[in-house]
Image (tube, rainbow, N blue to C red):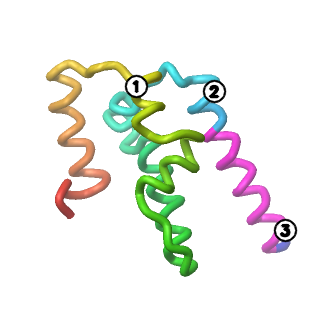
Amino acid sequence: MDEQTRIEIEAAAFRTLRHHLMEKRADVQNIDLMNLAGFCRNCLARWYQEAANERGIEMSKDEAREIYYGMPYDDWKAQSQTEADEAKKAAFEIAFRENVGPKDG
């Protein structure tokens, strides 16, 4: 497989994952994704931002999230996310630290 075809296939897989999480399984909470898989939709938006920044394209966290979510993150959060209980929040703190790093880092 040539390099361009590989890139196109990887991009198609990313778009399919995004569609699955945003359209087919919008009911799955970000906190549950992070606690079970070590990443969530916000991580995908951050990875998008980091890839853009690595290529010299300035993009903020909020801009990347709006691209990923298709709307401002706060709008999507209000429409799709529910308040997590204390046990999920505690598990999230551990999952975030183990998979993303310290919150201030």
| Residue 51 image-quadrant placement | bottom right
Q: Report the residue marked by disc 1.
A: 78
C-alpha distance separating marks 2 and 3: 31 Å
Please tell me which residue is depicted at 17% across the width and 23% down the height of the picture.
Answer: 87
Left or right: 39, with 24 as reference point: left
Q: Tell me the quadrant of the picture where the N terminus can be found.
A: bottom right
- Residue 15 to residue 33: above or below: below
Mark 1 near mark 2, Cβ–Cβ under 8 Å? no
Q: Looking at the picture, which amino acid does disc 1 mark?
A: Ala
- Residue 89 to residue 7: above or below: above
Q: Nearer the viewer, mark 3 or mark 1?
A: 1
C-alpha distance separating marks 1 and 2: 16 Å
Sequence-first disc among 2 and 3:
3
Q: Which mark is residue 1?
A: 3
> Residue 89 in the image: x percent, y percent?
19, 30
> Residue 28 in the image: x percent, y percent?
46, 23
Task: Give the SS element for disc 3.
Answer: loop
Sequence-first disc among 3 and 1:
3
C-alpha distance separating marks 3 and 1: 43 Å
Q: Looking at the picture, which amino acid does disc 2 mark?
A: Glu
Task: Give the SS element for disc 1.
Answer: helix
**Predominant secondary structure in magenta?**
helix
Please tell me which residue is depicted at 61% across the width and 40% down the height of the picture.
Answer: 18
